[in-house]
Image (spheres, grey):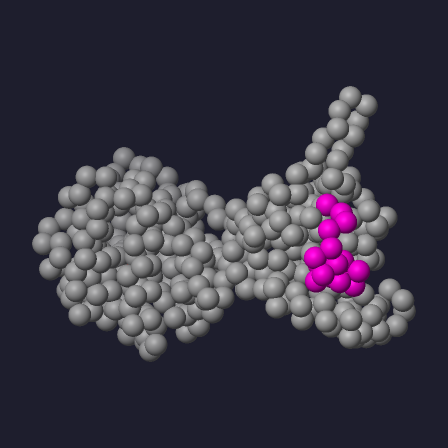
Amino acid sequence: MLSGKNVLLGITGGIAAYKTTFLVRLLIKAGAQVKIVLTESASSFVSPLTLATLSKNPVLTNFTQTDENSVDWNNHVELGLWADLMLMAPATANTLSKMANGNCDNLLLASYLSAKCPVYFAPAMDLDMYKHPSTKYSFERLESFGNIMISATAGELASGLHGEGRMAEPEDIVAFIENHLASGLPLSGKKVLITAGPTYEAIDPVRFVGNHSSGKMGYELAIKAAELGASVFLISGPSNLTIHNNRIKLIKVVSAEEMYVAAHKYFNEVSVAIAAAAVADYRPKTVANQKIKKSDEDLSIEFVKNRDILFSLGEIKEHQFLVGFALETENEVENAKKKLKKKNLDAIVLNSLNDAGAGFGKPTNKITFIDKNLTIKAFELKTKAEVAVDIWGEIVNRIHA
Ligand code: CTP
């Protein structure tokens, strides 16, 4: 949810400011770009140098920055417009009151007034200040503006007293924002399972039988599902692709048997499962313990059938919307329909090897989406990222119908 987002972090003067170093790291790890505006008093609690190093951006406090040769204007309007979201953490009673009343006596408040994006605030203060009617009034007023409060928690406070007023922990703040951004999205609150990539079936410790699948289609489906608000289990065979997304749990497997076990482990929990993997249909009957030495004779390897993961999921499915892929070279639509029925699927994505640009290892794909009512929709040749959008569009329409 935070990947690629511009986050403007406002830090005000409370002891919890020291925790913002961790907060910045978590935001960056989640894929956000972070710019920081620090109030004068916050800089007594946390060093601008530390924050600038972590955020890889200058940390701003004043409207102007002066060196011996020039004066630079820190443009609050630009900062406000740059931000996809603004986060005030820790937000002191003083700053919250000023925000609630439209005061504008520092760069942070001017940026707040200029921001058109969602604004989150994580209060931090002593328990009596937190309970005070004036502070409560600030909370209510800010929420009436559409700002989003990340409530303080109870515990030991810097004063030594126990009570409500501790700033939410950095990881809880990030989780709160991610969940909030995800809510209202079409797959919000849903879990999905995607298989991707090839499987490698071992012959001996150094050799295997595999295929040229890159995993790209499955990874794009996972990224799109996460963007639509889902939590994703991505079960991937060997692939060079990498993925960093808090909403995607990558489960790496090698063989079809390992993929089978992993898929069954998570299937119960999910609302949608998509089998995009190019699973090997057969594996060598025995795997040699030692590297097979060459001899003057030809070598024959006996293969046994792998279990069909998708078929087995079709047998046990209850509420899940189950989608398979079919790669066909002749009688494409008829064969895909047969596969859909045989494997008890809700839909099948057909790609035909007869279409130029579609297939293994290619950046593009040309698909036909067929659902269990045998409604057929053919799409143009597109990038796999665009194809993922089309596939999810079809699935979302059906699960919300
Ligand atoms: N699949 C699977 N487990 C297997 C084999 C296939 O989950 N052991 C899934 C694939 O991920 C894909 C679909 O089943 O979603 C493909 O079905 P399959 O019958 O294997 O078709 P193809 O390999 O395309 O074709 P064919 O039967 O013609 O070999």
Question: Where is residue 263 drawn, in percent x and y?
Answer: 40, 65
Residue in the foreground of this view, choosing between 315 and 73: 73
Q: Is residue 103 visible?
A: yes
Which residue sits at x=78%, y=75%?
A: 133
Which residue sits at x=30%, y=54%?
A: 390
Q: Splitting the image into 4 quarters, where does residue 69 fall?
A: top right
Answer left or right for 137 relative to 360: right
Answer left or right for 188 relative to 67: left
Question: Where is residue 224 drawn, in percent x and y?
Answer: 40, 54
Residue 78 part of the magenta-drawn span? no
Residue 201, compared with residue 171, is above or below; it is above
Residue 369, compared with residue 362, is above or below; it is below
Q: Quadrant of the C terminus?
A: bottom left
Question: Where is residue 289 drawn, in percent x and y?
Answer: 43, 50
Which residue sits at x=75%, y=62%?
A: 97
Which residue sits at x=25%, y=69%?
A: 346
Residue 242, compared with residue 264, is above or below; it is above
The part of the chain drawn in magenta is: 89-107
Q: Splitting the image into 4 quarters, where does residue 343 fall?
A: bottom left
Q: Residue furthest right?
A: 160
Residue in the foreground of this view, choosing between 226 and 44: 44
Residue in the foreground of this view, choosing between 190 and 256: 190
Q: Is residue 22 visible?
A: no
